[in-house]
Image (cartoon, rainbow, N blue to C red):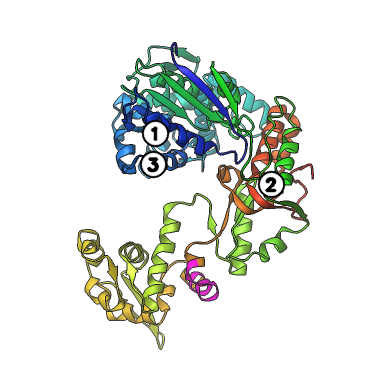
Amino acid sequence: MDGVKVLRAIGGAGTGKTRLMISTAEKALARPEVGGNPFAIGFSSFTRAARAEAAGRAAQAWGMAQAELERDGWFRTCHSVAYRQLGVSKGEVLGGSKADDKWVSEALGSDVAYSVEEDGGYAVYTGDPVAAAALNYWSLARSMVVPLREIAESAYEWEDDAPSAEEVIRRIEMYETAKRLDGRVDFTDLLCRFVGVSNDPAGGPDFVAPEGKVPDGVVGWIFDEAQDASKLLDMACRRLVSGDSCKWAWIVGDPFQVLYSWAGASSEFFMGWPVVRQEVMPKSYRCAAPILQLGEDCLQRLHKGYWNRGIAAADHDGEVVESGNYEDDLSDLTPDRETLVIARTNRNVGRIASILEDCGVPFRRIKTKDGAHNADIGMAGLWKLEHGQHATREEWTQAIDLLPSQTIRREAGVEHKETLLARGSKAQWSRGLAERHDILFPEDLAGVGATEHLRGMIADGRWCELVDGGIKWHRAAKKFGLEVVANPKIRIGTIHAAKGMEADNVIVLSSVGRRIRDGEERSDERHDEERRIEYVAVTRARKRLVIAHDPREKYRMELPL
């Protein structure tokens, strides 16, 4: 890092960190050493969503296609940079497909499945409790650059159902042997190789020569959400700025928004960079005074590390309301009012979803998989066709993906098979027929394979019977209108998933599980993590924050209301 000018920006909730980073990138493009070359600026975030948002905004500011910037430039996650620089083939990486899950399960002799934590980008294994725990401990040990035994023994001490360290090491030795024999790597391996860390399950980490070259020609790097870096991720960032061409780096984050200590994240790495200048962003443009103050009160309960950053509240008015029954709060929601509803656990998010569904109120889960959003697009197209309007190419593409090719009609106790889409019509649409249609009117449906029976079901609204969830969707569209149902203003999700989001109105379900409460009472680190989670939760609100309790729940967030 010799000769690299490093600057640190500390931004609290709603202080404009993203705006600062994009502004920095825009100004950097005009510098002589950059020479107007967008590929000379790197942006690295630890989540794909943040990287994609930054790439989109930068590409728009620079007058170029986002796809070009993402393909040829350095707006990438650290894992993506390592993957590219190591020259690893796609087939080598264990990425969480069903085939990869099967391979890992066979290597360990137990059924496991891989997923990416909904917004942290960290690998999480589920399934057989021993095998899944071993894989999760292995990921954590490598991220923290500590011996596996240290992680396993700590878990065994704290968790009643944790496997022994010997069993964990045995399983991971099986996993690593299988990887060597079949030439496979996982995402954590990519970073380890890029920074030069070798890991022995029975021994510990060792430092070796790093693999892959540092990206050529990158003059400056911007690191987003840097407070969530583990030691391994921090080492990767520091290697990126070690290139001969690198002149400067901005590290941006908030030490009080670390939510992934369970995955090795620590603000000490963010705050440990040698910087020539540090800025504290002075004003929140999101949080009204009572909301910002509640967030600060949550942080003041930290056992260690609190300091007052002196951030001023937004100019608009706001309020904090405490409610004794969250079900009443959800029942009162109207879909035309922007509202974010968040909870500490996925279990409680599921309860929120059930209540809204029972009330017939349309909503969308935060950071939902594409399939759920695509279903809304497809049903919106079918609704438009039902009402004599045109559907777009994308809407019909999603509609035929939702629709079955055949259905069963029952008449006088006899089943009759009815064809809905002509044989091969789905394939024909995807192979070129779609290119001939920017829009489709009801009279065009026969030409794209919709049979007379399907056209009749679309015309009279019975198409909703053919689609999973279609009847509820159709009922809600009748009640609230197409726009509200296709683009719900109510979003729900976990606090972790909502990080980085905001809304005028936010409802926080205060319930927490017994294990969460036990953990924070037994460990100062877990106690402080829960305070940071509370801070993130309450500071999603711009104007109105409702802290909603479940009267049946014994364990709640202990917010300083």
Magenta: main secondary structure equals helix
Is residue 184 visible in the rendered structure shown here? no
* Dots 3, 1 in contact, CB < 8 A: no
Q: Is residue 293 above or below residue 454?
A: above
Residue pictured at 50% horizontal, 39% vertical: 19
Residue kind at label 2, given as amino acid type: Ala
Q: In the image, which is nearer the foreground, mark 2 or mark 1?
A: 2
What secondary structure is found at the residue carrying circle 3? Answer: helix
C-alpha gap between disc 3 and disc 1: 18 Å
406 inside magenta stretch: no
Q: CA distance from mark 2 to mark 3?
A: 30 Å
The image quadrant where one finds the C terminus is: top right
Residue for badge 1 = 76
Tell me the residue that label 3 is attached to: 61
Q: Which of the marked residues, 3 or 1, is nearer the chain's N terminus? A: 3
Q: Which residues are magenta?
A: 473-483
Q: Secondary structure at mark 2?
A: loop
Q: Which residue is mark 2?
A: 288
Please tell me how crowded label 2 is: few (under 14), some (14-19), or many (20+) other residues with Cα within 10 Å: many
Label 1: state its secondary structure. Answer: loop
8 left or right, relative to 94: right
Name above or below for residue 247 compared with residue 89: above
- The answer to which of marks 2 and 3 sits earlier in the sequence is 3
Residue flagged by tag 1: what amino acid is it?
Arg
The picture quadrant where one finds residue 98 is top left
Q: Let me know if residue 361 appears in the view.
A: yes
Quarter of the rendering containing residue 77? top left
